[in-house]
Image (cartoon, grey):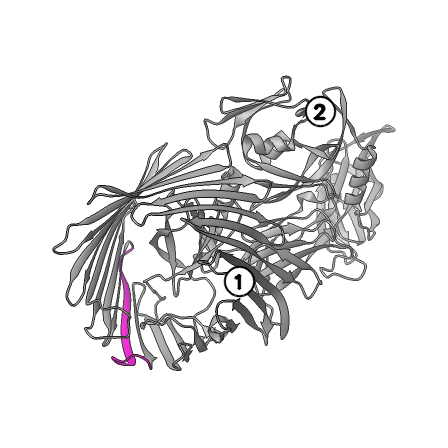
Amino acid sequence: MFKIALVFVVITGQGAVCNAQAIEEYDEVPVFFNIQRIGNTELPALIKDETAYLPVVDLFEFLKINIISKELDAVSGTFILPNADFLIDTPNNRVIFQGKTYDLKPNGIVKTTNNVYLRSEYFGEIFGLNCTFNFRNLSVILSTDVELPVLREMRQEQMRNNINKLKGIFKADTLVARTRPVFYFGTADYAFATSGGNEETPRDTRASLGLGGIIAGGETNVVLNYQSNYRFSNRQQYYLWRYVDNSLSFAKQFSVGKIRGQSISSIYAPIVGVQVTNTPTTYRRSFGNYVLNNYTEPNWTVELYVNGVLVNYTKADASGFYTFNVPLVYGNTNIKLRLYGPFGEERTTEQNISIPFNFLPEKEFEYTASGGLVEDGRDTRFARFSSNYGLNRHITVGAGFEYLSSVTSGSKIPYVNTSFRLFSNLMISAEYDIGVRGRSVLSYNMKSGLQFEMYNNWYRKGQTAINNTFLQEHKAILSFPFRTRHFSAYTRLSFQQIQLPNLTYQTGEWMVSGVVGTVNGSANTFALFIPGNDAYIYTIYSLGMRFFKNLIVTQQFQYEYTNSTVIAVKTSLEKRIFANGYANLSFERNYLSDVNNIEFGLRYDFSFAQTRMTVRKTNDTYRALQAVNGSIIHDGISGKTEFNNYTSIGKGAVLIIPYLDLNGNNKRDKGEPKADGLKVIANAGRVKKSAKDKTILIMDLEAYAAFNIELDPSGFEHVGWKLLKKNYAIVIDPNYVKNIEVPVSVFGEVSGQVIKLVDETEKGIGGILISIYNDKSQKIAETTSEADGYFSYLGLLPGKYTARIDTEKLTELELSVNKTSFDFTIKRSTDGSFVDGFKFVVKPVR
């Protein structure tokens, strides 16, 4: 009703009239802001002809942008970077940013008696803060590709909290445990893509449908895949039932279906079988770090998740290179990477990375047992048992057995392994697979950031378990970051030697990557050394630059030194169009293969789906691609259904339902309405607030992890609405929307006055204690009168109370009182009951 009233105010023009430049009339109303990947807030805005003017100071302060002057005629400060000065020049209707003057349309800036408002589109055109205003529901969606200070601060705080969780440091006043329904359907993913061109590129259509739910208390995921150019095959389909109970001692996870796990042998087909392990999904104390680096798309943001929680993030350079320090935890370290496009479109790709070290606390034992059939068309049987035991804090030993019936050199492979730390920064891991391979890994890190790694593999001649013909494989990597005030760079040098039965050759790589301001560049040099041949050496030079706030240009150049020739050049442009649209254009010329590639792509992210279209021309061959994907989240308890433009299967959600606890029993009873204005600070996921039913849905949460939220009552419209508990730790269930009813206590207030009567003259007296008792004569609160004699206390639940004056204090002051106590009742009310008029009259003792 509140939003409807606001819309009516805007339409009828009967709202608060502001003197904007002493000419026009505007309506000042509160507007709901949804700031992508940051959260929600409510700020005042001016509305005229369905155009929004947004408050400069209020919005910039929320985004943690530095403001030096808040004068109505001149709002100035620095935008993110210390040298990026800005000035909102109200009298001259202009904005000066980084030395450039933007002359605005008439009334581009509106000044009221206490605020300065800027037309919404100028936030995007000048500062890169794209604000999309929805007149119907009075909301603004703010999206940006710049690293806002508030986003950096939130991520850093989130990382600190999550790393503390990995170390076992976590505090919450309310813990919500897991839920295990017998049957529940909660999520669905869908994707459709079709491509094709001329006769040389026949049409190919692909579709997938995934369903996620809970059966018999266990996570159940089914994904059906279809491809027009291939027959329907069970090998293309995915299904898994997984039951997790960390309270069990002998086994904590049970999986049935398409299982995943490590193997010594090379297995390229899915395994249908059973897996049991006593490894918990909970966090265990962090003890060290491991450096991880790899390549992705240029200029993409990469987020690092350790066992389901965000612990770090970085941005890939112009060649796509990124690096992380991964905190190691006891037991299995599950590493997941999420990759985001450069314009914040939140198109994610997930990768699971294997860490070569496995440490356990002293005297702790873990095992994993797996078995099933490999879908390779030969009914290959697979079985594996692995175990590890912590000898002490520094040494963990392990042993196991693997069986794969298709291995001709020996289907049974026993093995032993160990991981140990000589020092806090020196770790060694070794494994011996009998009849197949021996391997070792050494990692040494210095405080300066320098890291040295050594990988060694020795293969038994004639083995067929691992699909290669190597006899030996050795690799050394030296990496080092260096930073100055205006410049940061990273270099990595690696050398690898591979011994084959009749040949030994070496490869090398030297990578240098650096960032200066908005320009990042890299040079990757690769070398191949084969005995009897000239060395083959080439370098890929990459340079990425940002222009006009939302245009990214990436240039690549590949040069081969042996023959002094250019191998290839590539130019890519990517630009944001509209609020959630993106366009890219690239040209690539490969001189070695005489191939020209031209590609143009468009994509648009709706709230319910991601869509994209790409046209690619390779010499005289054309190929076009059209695709759409998204997901659905269904809450079987509240009946809510949400459409999203990202995957949801295997993840969980939380629905926060704030309600007015009118009788104070911390239980939602019939007739108790929902409370509006609650704000949520979440350490993960995506927050979506419903203006219709006052609920807050937090989606995209990692299953089995403890999710921490902080409730902020500052948005409540009544001062009597309070939260008794603000910090919640919620264990997330997969494919499930967990409903959390949050009681909002409606407190009443009592007030009165202590009067000193002297010669028929009344005067307030301060410092007198007033105690408040409930109907059981229990003291529950106290307050003290102010200098004018008035006292008040806010925080009383509905019920009967007694306010009693401190007679001992009065005796010390040689005062008497006409009445020592007053009885009163706090009534049940949505606004909070207010009781007033009590007057304690004291006078000197004669």
| 250 horizontally vs 742: left or right | left
311 left or right, relative to 816: left
- Image coordinates of residue 678 in percent, x first then y, are 68, 48
Q: Compare marks 2 and 1 and give the one earlier in the sequence.
A: 2
Query: What residue did someone put label 2 on?
Result: 112
- Asked whether residue 463 is in view, the answer is yes
Residue located 45% across and 26% down the image: 83
Residue 806 shows in this picture: no
Mark 1 neighbour density, 10 Å: few (under 14) some (14–19) many (20 or more): some
Q: Quadrant of the C terminus?
A: top right
On whether residue 423 falls in the magenta region, the answer is: yes
Give the label on residue 205, or none. Answer: 1
Image mark count? 2
Q: Position of residue 777 (x, y in %)?
A: 76, 56
The CA distance from mark 2 to mark 1 is 58 Å
Q: Nearer the viewer, residue 127 or 721?
A: 127
Of labels 2 and 1, the one closer to you: 1
Secondary element at image label 1 = strand
* Residue 356, picture quadrant: bottom left
Where 624 sits versus 186, above or below? above
The amino acid beneath tag 1 is Thr
**Numbered mark located on residue 259 in the image:** none
Name the foreground residue: 300 vs 369. Answer: 300
Q: Which residues are magenta?
A: 405-424
Where 300 sits versus 413, above or below? above
Point 37% across, 32% down: residue: 486
Q: Residue furthest right?
A: 760
Secondary structure under the numbered disc 2 in the rendered image: loop
Left or right of 332? Residue 18 is right
Residue 590: x and y, percent? 33, 46
Q: In the image, 688: left or right of 412?
A: right
Q: Position of residue 309 (x, y in %)?
A: 48, 56
